[in-house]
Amino acid sequence: MYTMAEMLLIGSVFFIFFAYFGYPMTLFLLAWVRGRDVKRTAVLPSITFIVTVHNEETRIKDKLENTLSLDYPKDRLQILVASDGSSDRTNDIVRDHRNQGVALLEMPDRRGKESAQKEAVTSATGEIIVFSDVATTMEPGGLRQLVSSFADPTVGCVSSEDRLLGRDGKPSGEGLYVRYEMWLRALESRASSLVGLSGSLFAARKEVCQDFSGDMQSDFRTVLNSVKMGLRGVSDPLALGLYQDAADQKREWDRKIRTVVRGLTVFFRHVELLNVFQYGLFSYQLFCHKLLRWSVPFFLILALASNLVLIGHFLIYDVLLLLQISFYGFGILGLLRPKMQDMIVVKVPMYFLAVNASILFAWGRYLSGQRIITWAPTRR
């Protein structure tokens, strides 16, 4: 019994640390040995800028003004708002900007974000398609920066770099985790290809978007489409997507669960990409970044349960159990005492627990057969 518990504990701890630290270290070594630079050059391809909305009357005007202020030739920029069954004043506000070159694609029935994007792609005239959420803004030169990576013929899609801001304009409690994700994207870009794009702001060659599906996560699937076409996805650290922390934490929790459910849907419909003989390093990346990371909640449960069985067996196991309980305790303390959430010793375990709890809930929904198509935008 003790031998089995030891094997489960050691194995679980190994896979948890490998998912978050071992995988990035292998990417770091690969990038050092055979890194692939992105040949970025100032280019001006024709662009279709797609904003997908549902009942965004309070934010769509600011979004359009930000988009119209971007430093890009107007004759090479098509701005298209795909309104997914909006029933408020969103469509009227968009129509007020028609004389500034903004087009409205109005869908009377709500069918979901990806369905709206799919319809918008059929109306796109640009060589490059940029997808943006209404809550995400860009700096004036951000669009030029985002498309500069397409000067490299090996690039099929480009992700912006997220900058999450609190209400005071400073990095929020989630900022540390976001910075970790941005660091991981940089390593993936350097070693081979991204595994996932920033869903709030990314760009892709039009041909990569021809196989869009109305029921699968567009940012994840766009990378997979690129890889299947022999291209890669990259991240540009200078192309920033700026957005605020969520005002409604319940909706943010729902967003995390929704994102993973949708990611699982895409993953299990493209398991052929795990064939390392055909897709090489990307198969390893896909396994580690997605499936292994999504498995961490199960390893956490196994680690705690097996550690409890080993109490009093060896001192090292007692110390490890104390560390686990302390880590979870600080995380729970942060959830119960919001005033303590700025403390790093509380902030990291709190967000780690929240992320992995949402993944666990997402697995439950996915395995029960739930598939998420429509969405309620997170208020920020």
Image (cartoon, rainbow, N blue to C red):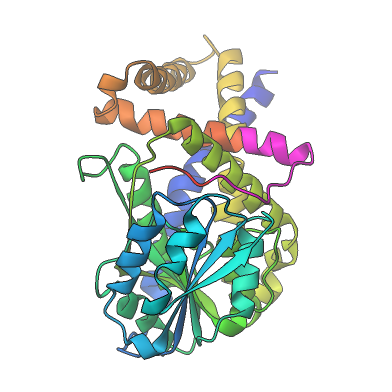
Q: Which residue is drawn at 37% across and 36% down?
A: 247
Question: From this viewpoint, which residue is outermost toward the right?
Answer: 369
Indicate the position of residue 347 as horizontal and vertical percent values: 32, 30
Observer-nearest of 274 and 317: 274
Q: In this view, does 29 lie above or below 98?
A: above
Q: Residue at x 25, y 44 (%)?
A: 171
Q: Is residue 172 above or below residue 239?
A: above
Q: Does the magenta stretch include residue 188?
A: no
Indicate the position of residue 241 as horizontal and vertical percent values: 34, 61
> Image check: 103 left or right of 32?
right
Q: Which residue is drawn at 42% across and 33% down?
A: 248
> Image check: 276 left or right of 28?
right
Could you tell me which quadrant the C terminus lies in?
A: top left
- The range drawn in magenta is 361-376
Evaluate whether residue 230 shows in this view: no
Indicate the position of residue 192 as horizontal and vertical percent values: 48, 73
Q: In this view, does 213 lie above or below 15?
A: below
Q: Residue at x 39, y 28 (%)?
A: 350
Which of the 4 image quarters holds residue 341?
top left
Indicate the position of residue 61 as horizontal and vertical percent values: 36, 59
Could you tell me which quadrant the N terminus lies in?
A: top right
Q: Is residue 375 magenta?
A: yes
Question: From this viewpoint, which residue is outermost toward the top?
Answer: 312
Evaluate whether residue 81 shows in this view: yes
